[in-house]
Amino acid sequence: MSKYTGYHGNALEFLKSKQIVVGDSVKILAELTYTGIIMPRYEHSDDKHIVLKLRSGYNVGLEIKKITSIEKIKPADRIMRKIEEVKSIEGLPKILLLSTGGTIASKIDYRTGAVTPVLTANELNSSVPELAKIADIDAKVLFSEYSENIMPEHWLKIAENISKYFKSDYSGIIIAHGTDTMHYTSSFLSFALAGFPLPIALVGSQRSSDRASSDAALNLMGAVKFLVECNTNGIYIVMHQDENDEAIACHIGTRVRKNHTSKRGAFQTVGDNPAFIIYNNEIHRNMKGDFFITKNYKQKIKLNQKVALVKYHPGYDPNMLKTIIDAGYKAIIFEGTGLGHVGKNMYPVIKIANERGIFMGMTSQCIDGRVRMTVYESGRDLLSLGIVPLEDMIPEVALVKAMWASGNGENHDEIKEIMLNKIASEFST
Amino acid sequence: MSKYTGYHGNALEFLKSKQIVVGDSVKILAELTYTGIIMPRYEHSDDKHIVLKLRSGYNVGLEIKKITSIEKIKPADRIMRKIEEVKSIEGLPKILLLSTGGTIASKIDYRTGAVTPVLTANELNSSVPELAKIADIDAKVLFSEYSENIMPEHWLKIAENISKYFKSDYSGIIIAHGTDTMHYTSSFLSFALAGFPLPIALVGSQRSSDRASSDAALNLMGAVKFLVECNTNGIYIVMHQDENDEAIACHIGTRVRKNHTSKRGAFQTVGDNPAFIIYNNEIHRNMKGDFFITKNYKQKIKLNQKVALVKYHPGYDPNMLKTIIDAGYKAIIFEGTGLGHVGKNMYPVIKIANERGIFMGMTSQCIDGRVRMTVYESGRDLLSLGIVPLEDMIPEVALVKAMWASGNGENHDEIKEIMLNKIASEFST
């Protein structure tokens, strides 16, 4: 960490001219008065703002040209805190933690104001000391990305890393992951690692660990308990059930969505209860049957990104669909209306897609409930144009599955067969 | 209604050769055995199927070439049922019903198997006799479309028709509408008719009136009660609250979504209780304040369809955004992840959109909760690239509002001002 991490151009000049460095506590007069700690920035940042961590825990970006004055209250304390060595306790279950980034994998040092990735098991244990009492955790950093920057290439990398532990003495694997796109990643892992013998829990946090309301520690503790006691396999998202700290929900990785921007209980299993709930430190199973159809693990870590998600709405221009067809897409997932419809103005272009052998699957923007394309004439028309109803698969899951199916299937019929074949609880029944 | 309405080509030949007409009760042997009534089809239908209404009330399309035999059980009864003349009762409140199509505006005649629009007040009253006891209803058919075929042009037509009744002795106006895109239509009306003095209720049904579980009658009854007793104005969607018949919910037209494909209680107010609930025939108000900000009605029935809704996901190709820019779009609404993010691979193309003066607004695919783009560096980057956070506006509502704003604003800054200006309860606070 340099004194000016991430600052360049005008912003760097500004800080230097005022003799302020990252980690300094300052008072700033702009449109309002702000008190806080100067935060580091990252490589892609603009040079027009400086970033201040307020006492509330929230960060605020301040435009330099609107700053009337900046005053140093307390200089940055640049001595690194000593990491306590946590002794592992003999006989505890072993857990592997793979870190990919996101709020949960970061730790904010109040004295330097820096967000640092939690790199080692020791740092993790020192950050959540309760963990060392219940499991022996090995931690490994795969990469460090906010989840909006997680791409399909990252899914492949995570899956390949997990696959190495097919035969190991771990009780389960935790993936620390940003929450924004966690359900896309959990879906990919569910298909690519079908039958993987160890349970896998994706864990995130909605509030960073420097805030009093942080959910990071409890979600991690819940994940460990779940992996050790669930007595099954599968890919799950483990997060707060709601705003209180008594219930941790373990959602099926192909039936879950982030349904609130900021609440701790943001994740919900669509149309059902979570697969498991940990309530007052006791684990309760709601899931009937197994997560995977197959009992034999056979990895299929491949995908093709040429899959589009088309959300139909009044005024959607069929020419936009034509553009997708002409760009050589292999599959199109429609987020249709209601039971699985699109306007009849779309039919001519859908006909072209069908003639070109592009797989087209139908889901519903209602999110909950089953598409049913035989009830109305318009649904039957779409069926005859080659659109395949995808039951109650969640649109985002259908998108990920279609990328995976397009990577593993050669042509339309193979993709269709894979899409309709239940693999990892992606259909509710 | 002809004997072969909607049938042509092979399907017509098939029926003629078997001496079967629309409305006949038949027994068909195909992959399974089916018993039901031959249904009419509509103009765009293919010629490979015939459609049968089963006893369950559901329709099924049967491929001709898979039919082994078809046997007439009972010929169609082609005598039209006499419409009973319903006498209006003096002194009842007056309601205007404008019909646009959808399940609610159709009536199925079991003897002919035909779906016919409910055209006149008399037919409506004969179909839901209880209505005549509580209101004096004038009915007018604007058009007859399933809601997936309702286009922005239809929104304009509905708004123009409503605007004629600015000064009238109606207590309120009902719009009978298909449920699939009802919340898009209610949003447009909310902006285009801001301040309109009479309350307006969009009403649909999830189950057609020939099914025992139909919600059509109760939803209509609820809407009438609401319009007469709500004592306010605004645009609402009035539908079953849940599966039971005791509660009808009246949702704010800009805060509502269809969140289930088939349940009767499919519509939900996002993140709040419905504005009004009619429970056991009593009306309860939850809405605080007024629906519209303005008290003065001034119609602005204009729109520009050149608005795109971009749902970001891992693997979204930034080139698709470039296509939208190059197609001359005026505004782009992002359905970002979490608090309002997209991957940093999108930044270069977003920069181009910004330079071209295209309005870009951010909503969240979480649907519930507020976007907050100052918490993470990536959100701040997007702000500096010109993306405007749209608070907790629902993505579909933001899309419709942007179409309306682009029709009423000349340039980026005017569109932005309109978008951020609360007009019709589209922000929750």
Image: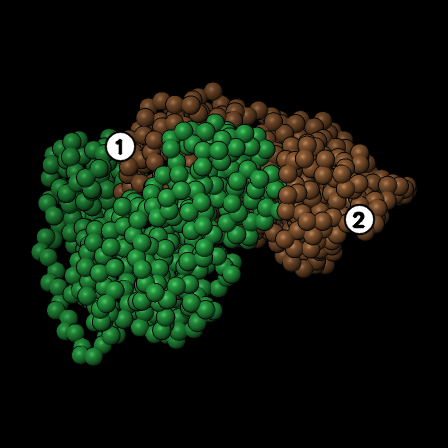
Chain colours: A brown, B green
Residue at 21% over, 48% down: B37
Residue at 49% over, 35% down: B354
Query: Which kind of residue does numbered mark 2 sit on?
Result: Lys
Q: Quadrant of residue B64?
A: top left
Q: Quadrant of the N terminus of chain A?
A: top right
SS at badge 2: strand
In the displayed structure, A251 sits above or below A293; it is below
Residue at 43% over, 22% down: A328
SS at badge 1: helix
Q: Are marks 1 and 2 in contact (CB under 8 Å)?
A: no
Left or right of B74? Residue B202 is right
Q: Nearer the viewer, residue A345 or A34?
A: A34
- Provide the residue designation for mark 2: A72
Residue at 51% over, 61% down: B429
In the displayed structure, B335 sits above or below B345; it is below
Crowd tier of the residue under label 2, counting other residues whose Cα lies within 10 Å: few below 14, some 14–19, many 20 or above: some
Q: Nearer the viewer, residue B408 or A373?
A: B408
Q: Chain of mark 1?
A: B
**In this view of the protein, can residue A74 be seen by the observer?**
yes
Query: Which kind of residue does numbered mark 1 sit on?
Result: Lys
- Provide the residue designation for mark 1: B66
Left or right of A388? Residue A223 is right
Picture coordinates of residue B143 (x, y %)? 21, 51
Crowd tier of the residue under label 1, counting other residues whose Cα lies within 10 Å: few below 14, some 14–19, many 20 or above: few
Picture coordinates of residue B374 (x, y %)? 62, 47
Mark toward the viewer: 1 or 2: 2
Picture coordinates of residue A27 (x, y %)? 75, 52
| Distance (Cα) linking label 1 and label 2 | 83 Å
Question: Looking at the picture, do discs 1 and 2 lie on one chain?
Answer: no
